[in-house]
Image: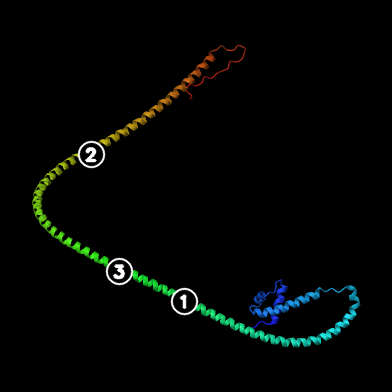
Amino acid sequence: MAITREQILETASKLAEQGIKPTQTNVRESLGGGSFTTISEVLREWRADQDQTAQLQAVVIPADITDRTNILIAQLWETAQNLANDRLLKEREALEHKEALINAEIDESNKIIETLENEQAELTNQLDTLNNDNSLLTHKNNELENLTNSLKTQLTAEKDRADQATAHANQLQAKLDEQNAKIERLTAELATATANANQATETANANAQRADQAIAELQNTHIENAKLIGKSDTLAEQLTKAEATATAQANKIEALTAQVAKLEQIEKENAELKRMIEGNKKIDDKQQSLLDQPQDTTGAKPRKTQKPNNNEN
């Protein structure tokens, strides 16, 4: 669908109100498409209207003239408005006719441009397809070359393997001949070894007789060892009895040691009692000496002193 003049003017005004300069690119992006030629022509008209409006807004009427010309202006305005309406109607009809012709031309141009753009896009797609096909063919050609090189390499390797197999077969034949010669030599050595084995058998028989004699001697030795083992068992029993006796004596020694310790404790206690008795005796002697002193003759009654009992404590 073609972009109309009114849409371009409305979009330019909205961008200007938002503080965005209404360039051809900005208007086309806001509309989502459109021909640059159509947008350029409408924007030129929109800028001319904006300039004229700015010039009219810049005109300032003096205050003294305004007061005297208000009535005249009103009359002129009414007349001019009537004339302008008639003229505007005629110009609008002519402009609409002209605009229709221009829009028809623009539509035709847009159709032509759209057709050219579609053809260009189709050619671009065909070119992309050809480029892709060329890339695929180039890739396949490279793969075929790589496969050919790989087959050549494999063929060379197979030839090398065949040559190696032939050489290996020759080596095996030489080894086979060598093994046959070795078998013949070993056959001769086997015959010699058989003769030596027969002689060794005779020697083994003689050694077997000697071994029988050694076994008899060994059996005699075992009998002597059994006797010695019996004596050893007897000595072990005696040793066990001696250890039991020693253990009993050790127990007795421990009991005697305990009794000696107890006697020593009793002696210590007796010594302590003896010391206490001697102390009590010294106290009795001191008290007796006090009793033996002269009595006081001042008329006081003699104080009766009780002799302590030596059996206390």
* Residue 64 position within the rendered picture, expressed as x and y whole percent measured from the top left: 90, 73
Tag 3 residue: 158
Q: In the image, 42: left or right of 71? A: left
Circle nearer the viewer, 1 or 3: 1
Q: Are marks 2 and 3 in contact (CB under 8 Å)?
A: no
Query: How many marks overall?
Result: 3
Disc on the earlier residue, 2 or 1: 1
Circle nearer the viewer, 2 or 3: 3
Q: Amino acid at mark 2?
A: Ala
Residue 153: which quarter of the image? bottom left
Q: Which mark is residue 186?
A: none
Residue 291 in the image: above or below residue 101: above
Neighbourhood count class around disc 1 (C-alpha, 10 Å): few under 14, some 14–19, many 20 upward: few
Q: In the image, 265: left or right of 223? A: right
Circle nearer the viewer, 2 or 1: 1
Tag 1 residue: 134
* Residue 274 position within the rendered picture, expressed as x and y whole percent measured from the top left: 44, 22
Question: Residue at 60% of width from left, 82% of height from top?
Answer: 114
Disc on the earlier residue, 2 or 3: 3
Tag 2 residue: 236
Q: Are marks 2 and 1 in contact (CB under 8 Å)?
A: no
Residue 80 in the image: above or below residue 61: below
Q: Amino acid at mark 1?
A: Asn
Work out how far the residue at label 1 is from the one at label 3, CA to CA, in angstroms: 35 Å
